[in-house]
Amino acid sequence: MQKILIDDISPGSVIAKDILNHEGVMLIPKGTILRDKFISQLHEIGVEEILVEENEQESAQRIKEIQKSMNIDEIIFEKTRIQAQMQIKKLMVKFSTMNHMNLDKIKYLVEDIIEQLLLKKDIVLTLSRLRSIDNYTYEHSVNVCVLSLIVGIDLNLDRDSLKNLGIGAILHDIGKVGVSEGILKKPSRLTEKEFEEVRRHTQYGYDILTNTNISEEAAQIALCHHEKYDGTGYNRRLKGESIPLYSRIVAVTDVYDAMSNDRVYKKKMSPDKVFKEIARMGNKHFDREIMEKFVRHLSLYPTGTGVILNTNHRGIVIEQNRLLPESPIIRLFKKDKSSNRSSFVDVDLSTTRYLFIKDTF
Ligand SMILES: [Fe+2]
């Protein structure tokens, strides 16, 4: 075992000795795989260093470095993504002082995103990148736009419809300019009154957008993206196909993106759990046909995911197996004890009957 400072620990490391609090109460038992959530909890309670299993800390560290440097194919150009995020930020910040929105630039960027997506075939979503909590709304807006357009393309929407869907999707949460920052960034549970204020972002967004030159259909997305197919959503508890099509699309992509990334009040879920959760919610909250179109682009274990096998070996997903999504090709790391050299081996899980993924990190 090895003593490691909490600042240097990597998710995926394994605790080598029970962690107790000052009163001797067990906090985390030996053998637990450390996740981001546990690491930040340990930070919060002031733990400075812990004992971890040596080999596993090393391979987890190695995987983290590889994940950072992996050249994962971006769905849209990084430059476009950043420009769009900056533009949303500008719109939201300026609106509070000018009370007016000029959407020309963001419209142009959405058209650029559509062009880029139309050139791609068979898009599989890769591991979501690390997000900064401060820029959450802007990054989330662009992601929801890209994901919604992927569904729109699958539905064979024409170019004008895609433009309406894209602009409405990228601005779906614009009404958050009317919600106090304290509530949006509150790390703990919201009171019913605070929830009510959050819910108002839909009507507020719609009111802002109807004063611009975007179409009614696009503005409706801001109003209806929290409606649920079974009629349990807000604001108007619309049901089934009385919810406009574009809002039914954004309802799925909005929830997917939120679950896949850290938020101030909740840690992200692993891709396989998000996949299952979206499929489960499909029966109640979403339009089933749209949900099914969307999940075709998801992967249980996106490229770049750290995985733990039934043999406790650690690896990283390097390639997908489209026909067998639960069995991707993974790179396993090992260290030769005599020479102290690290090496790796690539294993196609679809060709082995005895190896399977038991967990992710
Ligand atoms: Fe929203």
Image (spheres, rainbow, N blue to C red):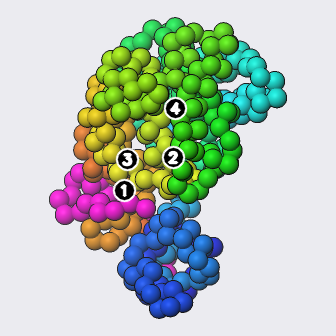
Which numbered disc covers residue 274?
3
Label 2 amino acid? Glu
Specify the segment rendered in magenta: 337-361
Residue plotted at (57% across, 32% down) = 200
- Residue for point 27% across, 51% down: 327
Sequence-first disc among 2 and 4 = 4
Alpha-carbon distance for marks 2 and 4? 27 Å
Residue with the most extreme right position: 97
Cβ–Cβ under 8 Å for marks 2 and 3: no
Amino acid residing under circle 1: Ile
Q: Element type at marker 3?
A: helix
Q: Can residue 143 be seen in this view?
A: no
The label number, if any, that marks residue 192 in the structure image: 2
Marks 1 and 2, the one that precedes in the sequence: 2
Vertical side of 11 occupied by 257: above or below: above
Q: Are marks 4 and 3 in contact (CB under 8 Å)?
A: no
Magenta highlight on residue 348: yes
